[in-house]
Image (cartoon, rainbow, N blue to C red):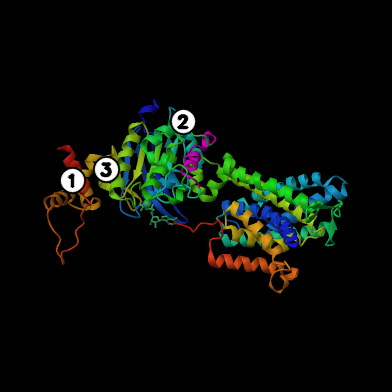
Amino acid sequence: MNELLQLIANGLVTGSIIAIAAIGLSLVYGILKIVNFAHGEYLVFGAYMALVVNVTWGQSLVLGALFAMIMTALLGIALEFGLWRPIRRRGAGIVSLLIVSIGLALVLRNSILLWQGGAPRRYDVDVFQVYELGPIRLSLSQIVVIVVASVVIVGIGLLLARTTLGKAMRALSDSRDLASVSGIDTDRITAYTWIVGSALAGLGGVLQGLVQNAFEPNMGFRLLLLIFAAVILGGVGSAYGALVGGLVLGLMMEVSTWSALPAGGVDSVYKPVVAFVVLILVLIFRPQGIFGRARTV
Amino acid sequence: MSTDRPLLETADLDAGYGEVNILHGLSIAVPRGAIVSVIGPNGAGKSTLLKAIYGFLKPRRGTVVFRPDGAEHDITGMKPNKLTELGMNYVFQLDNVFPNMTVRENLEMGAYLRGGKPDKEILERIHGWFPRLDERRRQRAGTLSGGERQMLALGRALMSDPKLLLLDEPSAGLAPSVVDVIFEKLQEINGAGISIVMVEQNARRSLEMSDYGYVLDMGRNHFEGAGSKLLHDESVVELYLGGRGRLAAAQLIADEDYEAKPGDAPRRQGRFRHEQDKEKRHE
Ligand SMILES: Nc1ncnc2c1ncn2[C@@H]1O[C@H](COP(=O)(O)OP(=O)(O)O)[C@@H](O)[C@H]1O
Ligand SMILES: [Mg+2]
């Protein structure tokens, strides 16, 4: 039983990071219908920005994380103005946008590789400090992830449900044309969406870099598949869905290794496989995802 | 001096999709306070005209002018959200509500230019016209019936307190009883000082309540005139109002007790039913 509780705690940690990254991807998809394959690289970019502050400049990682969010938001907005908007204006279709995003992912990943090299890097924090909460043992970094994720999740929920900006984002993801007829400046809301989505990606990258202890430029690519799985699981284009999808995925992956399960649980090497089995099962029984709604015409 | 000039005027408008031109030198004028109908066969370019006015299509030639209050604005190709700021709104034929938002949130989006906070008076007026929208305020718009959706679409558009409404087939796909309600409310809305440009398949109905009408064909002005004049114009009736409409209506009423027998040709019953009702009401 204690083992299960521990696994659930670990699952919440993994799931929180996936969820934070997936919300960003889902917001952008909802509004621009861009499947951004470079989203994983936005995470890596954030992780390295925090590294610069924390290791190169010797400042605290909290400062590093804030810097990472700001810089990744700037990256997101710069790419919106310099790349996405110009090609949207030319009427690029969904496939062209997809290919551009794959190209962008390669450019970003290799730029980071050139800049920082491929060797694993770590933040300058004491990760071995362990806290015991009843039967559960969590490292400081894991606790930080859970706390930060809870704040972010509540914050995003409030943003979307309560604020005019959040409602405008949802309106845009329902119908761009109708949003503009309602007086919404769609270009402006699109820019805000990139800011929110990219900042979350930057934060997700720092958190992932923190919990996996060491990271390198390929971290984002490996996470990307899980992030996509979370978005699809929750229902494409639904930010709440992406959040739940991320958490479900994280929990499933960890709990599947429980030794009380038949055959002693899944070998932890195969955790990602579990994620995709869950995804496939959900898609068979609920093709629109947990929170998605069947499209009505 | 601009008060006696039309509220909206398009002059010599050419617009289309990709390389293809759909509108050829289209000119319409909407007098202040009027209801103007644009009718014509399927594919005539009626929806394209509305899209070109509202900046969803960039006109290749010609101008669109809007004169909301004293000032005159050249709005040719202006972005849709700017037009809404100037005092217009537009109800699409399809996808005219935000399906994943509640009824209330849809109305709030209509009031986006007031920071998403509905003006109390406007909201009450809209709820007065469409009480359903108040009853269903927490319901997701995607789950509304066709008629309720149309009401919400109108409500959303009215939230911005427009001077002019563009409506693309507000009665399309609705049950006859709902069509009656919608047309009745449109007249009340117009009575509150909001001018209306309405594209309609239901040509006879819309001309009956219009001050002025345009008949489009193949993207060109074909006929125009006062609503009542077009209704009685031989060639308009012949081509666009289903031929000898008056006679057919009379026939329907005369045949009231007629019972269909197997093998009878299907009759387009009900089409003129409203006229029948109307005549009864006038008695
Ligand atoms: N998005 C579009 N792309 C290309 N052609 C279109 C598009 N929408 C409409 N058309 C064409 O433009 C013409 C006019 O269409 P439309 O304005 O919708 O007619 P109406 O509303 O009078 O039925 C039609 O021939 C139609 O096929
Ligand atoms: Mg049409």
Q: What's drawn in magenta, residue-wise?
A: B101-115
Please give the residue where the numbered disc 1 appears in the rendered image: B276
State the residue at coordinates (45%, 36%): B159
Circle nearer the viewer, 3 or 2: 2
State the residue at coordinates (33%, 38%): B185
Badge 3 amino acid? Leu
Mark 1: secondary structure? helix
Q: Residues within 10 Å of mark 2 (few under 14, many from 20)?
A: few
Please give the residue where the numbered disc 3 appears in the rendered image: B207
State the residue at coordinates (51%, 56%): A293
- Identify whether A120 is placed above or below B181: below
Evaluate whether label 1 is on the same chain as label 2. yes
Badge 1 amino acid? Gln
Q: Is residue A47 visible?
A: yes
- Identify whether B166 is placed above or below A129: above
- As for residue B103 lying within the magenta part, the answer is yes
> Residue A259 at x, y = what percent?
74, 68
Horizontal side of B182 relative to B119 (left or right) equals left
Q: Chain of mark 1?
A: B
Q: Chain of mark 2?
A: B
Badge 2 amino acid? Lys
**Distance CA(mark 1)–CA(mark 2):** 40 Å
> Residue A155 at x, y = what percent?
65, 44
Please give the residue where the numbered disc 2 appears in the rendered image: B120
Instruction: Between residue B60 and residue B184, name the one nearer to us.
Output: B184
- Identify whether A163 is placed above or below B176: above
Q: Chain of mark 3?
A: B
Task: Please identify the dominant SS of the magenta region.
Answer: helix
Within 8 Å: ligand 2 and the Cβ of disc 2? no
Circle nearer the viewer, 3 or 1: 1
